[in-house]
Amino acid sequence: MIDEAQNLNEYDDKTRLMGAGFEWLRACQEEGGFALAFCGDLSLVKIMADNPQLDSRMRRPLVLKGASKADIAAIAESWGVTDSPTLAVLGSAAKRRGGLRNVVNVLSTAMDFGGGRITPASVVAAITAEGLEPKGGL
């Protein structure tokens, strides 16, 4: 699984082609016989469509336009967070650009702020530190 795969669409000075990183990974996948998944932002769909050698092997893209409350709760629960007010605050962070990545970043920072324990106060402090406060404050 390759995250931020849209960044592989770079110009190769040697071949004078765009997307050499995709081609290299596709060749590795064929030779190695392993599965390959590209994750990235919405520009990735167009990049894949512009590369017929990749597009023909691709399944219909899955586009996540938002994080559900269940997704947020599942991630938070893996960090030991289950209380509704904290989940609501994490939901506000997930609405910002970055989505579920924001939730993980906030929980990680909250763990640091809480001295190894995540508390509602450490989550609020982490959201502030990450610059993810909703307009009007928390």
Image (cartoon, grey):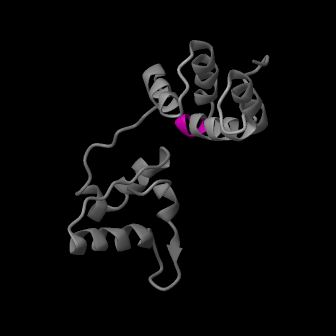
The rendered magenta stretch, by its main secondary structure, is classed as helix
The image shows a total of numbered marks equal to: 0
Give the residue drawn at x 40%, y 37%.
63
Quarter containing the C terminus: top right
Residue 68 in picture, x, y percent from top left: 46, 23
Residue placed most toward the observer, 61 or 31: 31
Q: Is residue 24 left or right of residue 5?
A: left
Q: Residue furthest front?
A: 116
Q: Which residues are magenta?
A: 98-102
Residue placed most toward the observer, 77 or 2: 77
Q: Is 14 included in the stretch rendered in magenta?
A: no
Give the residue drawn at x 58%, y 29%.
94
Residue 104 in picture, x, y percent from top left: 57, 38
Q: Residue furthest left?
A: 33
Quarter containing the N terminus: bottom left
Q: Is residue 136 left or right of residue 32?
A: right
Residue 46 in picture, x, y percent from top left: 42, 50
Residue placed most toward the observer, 119 or 60: 119
Establish if 24 lies above or below 75: below
Establish if 125 lies above or below 12: above
Give the residue drawn at x 63%, y 31%.
96
Q: Is 101 included in the stretch rendered in magenta?
A: yes
- Residue 66 visible in the current orientation: no
Q: Is residue 65 left or right of residue 86?
A: left
